[in-house]
Amino acid sequence: MAREDFKHKLTAIICFIIIAHLLSCARPPRTNRFGFAQHNYVYKVPEKTDDGWETSSLSTENVNSKKINELILDILNGKFKNIYSILIVKNGKVILEEYFYGYNRDSIFDLQSAVKSVVSILVGIAIDHKMISSLDQKVYDFYPEFKKTNWIEQKNEITIKHALTMTAGLEWDSYTSDLSRNDGTKLWQSDNRLRYVMEKKLVEPPGSKFNYSSGLSVLLGGIIKETTGNYCYQFAEKNLFQPLGISNYQWDLGQWRIDVGGTVGKLFLNPRDMAKIGYLMLKEGNWQGKQIVSKQWVIESTKPHITSDLFGAGYGYQWWYGNEVIRGQSINTFYAAGKGGQHIFIVPKLDLVTAFTSKVNDNPLGMYRLQAIMTNSIIPAMLSQSQPQKIAKIDLLTPKKYEGKFRITGYDEILTIIRKENTLFCKLFGDKFELIHSANHQFYGESKNIGEVKIDFLTDNQNDIESLEVKIGFIRLPFTKMN
């Protein structure tokens, strides 16, 4: 009987091990040597290779290792999902290099729309070489073969600068969930993408309003070809990648070799080389003593020329720009951003570059999550400690005024503020979290999907809530109250 008990216990143990292993095979961020999900973390100084990077440690560069360790543990334990890699460069040295879900240093990742920022550099190099004479050149001048399109027949005053800043004034909708009306989707399905863009109607004066369009980046890629005689990948190989020592890459331009950005012109890089792009811009176009693109171009292309109404972030020449006060310091950043969370953040004040790669598809919160990681974890790790945030108390009669539903301007997302007794909760992006009052009509909360979220309520002349602004990292999402 004792022997039978032993068999039953042994069988139960084996079943438990098998089930645990099967559960761990649900592709955890990282596994240990036994194949089980890894939930602990020990920091290691990045390895020095022959790729041109020097390496250093968190402590040597005066970085708060506790904040960084907490971040990596949050990724390992599933708080921040779908992140494939994080690489941090501080003071010109790689100080953190972490990969997840089986990826490693040699893995190359699809940058998605972060490639737009690379194309911006190529435009700058072409200007430096006098191949493009001026940003004020009309785009239609480069495409005489499309003379029967709306752009050319109407002589639209759209310049290269308008294309760079996404201010062409075209009728274009990239954000609708209705794919039959989404111009981004229809662009890539078109038999002739250039013609598709040039047939769009002009609805705003060029230069007056930001409207994100991958079609404009397609045109920029074509202009590089028309002016330099080289496709983007050829021009980049000689004038950008070789000088930076980038050789492990793939640039899939698809059927139309002038396409860039979006889902057709795909540039694949590894994180160390993504960081080289960022560090080149941090050092105003200089890499290891060689000026690859002019300082003037870097300054002009990374400052905000226009503001996105949807994201509340500045936009330069295919580079995003943001500002946030963190631990009492005003921090500016410019960054390349691709679908799902393919980002290169540059923070000049801190001599900091951070490169992220993430799951591209079915990862709509990837962009927001990385923004929050930058402002809540990585940048604070570079700054001195400060006093904890004070919590303000709400008048017992006040919380009710904040309740309601809010719709994001120009998008389908709805935010809901609900009250339970004297506590407010926010429902956003499939998550519900408590709101803590910080000052006046300002609140903050911790979303399990994103991280820290700040909300500012805006009032009308009668002091009634009419709208709110959600702050995540460096972006601002405007919501209007629904009746």
Image (cartoon, rainbow, N blue to C red):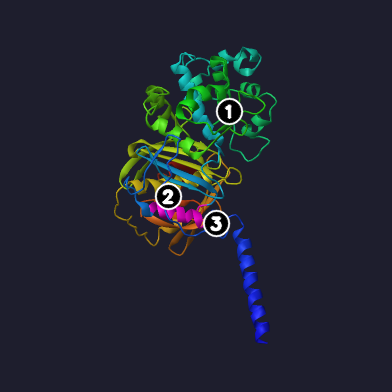
Q: CA distance from mark 2 to mark 3?
A: 34 Å
Which residue is painted at 34% across and 39% down in the image? 91
Instruction: Report x, y in % for residue 429.
Output: 54, 50
Instruction: Report x, y in % for residue 238.
Output: 51, 22
Image-based side of 160 in relation to 257, left or right: left
Instruction: Report x, y in % for residue 1.
Output: 68, 87
Q: Which residue has dot 2 on it?
A: 454
Amino acid type indicated by mark 1: Val
Image-based side of 470 in relation to 4, left or right: left
In the image, the segment drawn in magenta is 67-80
Q: Which residue has dot 3 on it?
A: 31
The residue mark sitting in front, 2 or 3, is 3
Any magenta on residue 371? no
* Among numbered discs 2 and 3, the one appearing first in the sequence: 3
Contact flag, marks 2 and 3 (Cβ < 8 Å): no
Q: 137 above or below 188?
A: above
Q: Which mark is residue 260?
A: 1
Q: CA distance from mark 2 to mark 1?
A: 35 Å
Q: Mark 1: few, some, or many residues within 10 Å (few <14, many ≥20)?
A: many
Secondary element under disc 2, as helix, strand or loop, is: strand
Contact flag, marks 3 and 1 (Cβ < 8 Å): no
Instruction: Report x, y in % for residue 384.
Output: 29, 49
